[in-house]
């Protein structure tokens, strides 16, 4: 008989260069587990920096606990949603210092926030 309890150590997040996804209507889905693939883009440099348009883009599958990230160009005048806006500055910095902590935090939030 299979043990239905959750493992004592949840699967750790793994950074991958790519993983297979499929388009289902207007959503990307993980091809392995059919979980919605989520993403988040944020500005890495301050507004007065010449590198302000270089942003960090993260994409992840909460089911498989894999993620990928890249630097992407976002026009200076495009406003990006800030999923960390409600956090204290120290907590924001702690999350941004580790991709894994950031993805874990974002993955735990409802998708529409």
Image (tube, rainbow, N blue to C red):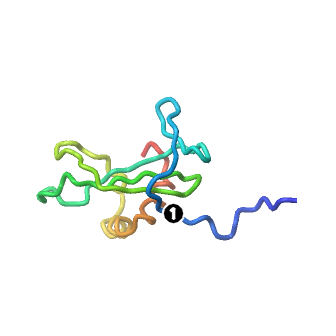
| 82 left or right of 18 in image | left
What quarter of the picture does the N terminus occupy? Answer: bottom right
Q: Which residue is mark 1?
A: 14
Q: Horizontal and vertical percent for residue 73?
A: 24, 49
Q: Is residue 92 left or right of residue 43?
A: right
Q: Is residue 102 left or right of residue 8?
A: left
- On the picture, is 42 further left or further right than 62? left
Q: At 37% from the left edge and 67% from the top edge, which residue is drawn?
A: 91
At x 64%, y 70%, the residue is 9
34 to 82, vertically: above or below: above
- Residue at image x 59%, y 52%? 63
* Horizontal and vertical percent position of residue 6: 71, 62
How many numbered badges does the structure rendering display?
1
Q: Quadrant of residue 58?
A: bottom left
Residue 46 locus on image (x, y percent): 18, 60
Q: Secondary structure at mark 1?
A: strand
In the picture shown, does residue 18 fall above or below 92?
Answer: above
């Amino acid at each position: 008989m299979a043990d239905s309890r959750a493992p004592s150590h949840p699967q750790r997040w793994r950074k991958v260069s790519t993983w297979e996804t499929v388009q289902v209507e207007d959503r990307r889905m993980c091809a392995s587990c059919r979980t919605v693939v989520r993403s988040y883009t944020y500005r890495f440099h301050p507004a007065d920096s010449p590198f302000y348009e270089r942003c960090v883009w993260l994409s992840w599958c909460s089911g498989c606990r894999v993620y990928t990230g890249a630097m992407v160009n976002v026009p200076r005048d495009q406003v990006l949603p800030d999923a960390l806006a409600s956090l204290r500055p120290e907590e924001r910095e702690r999350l941004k210092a580790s991709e894994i902590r950031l993805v874990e935090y974002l993955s735990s939030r409802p998708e529409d926030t």
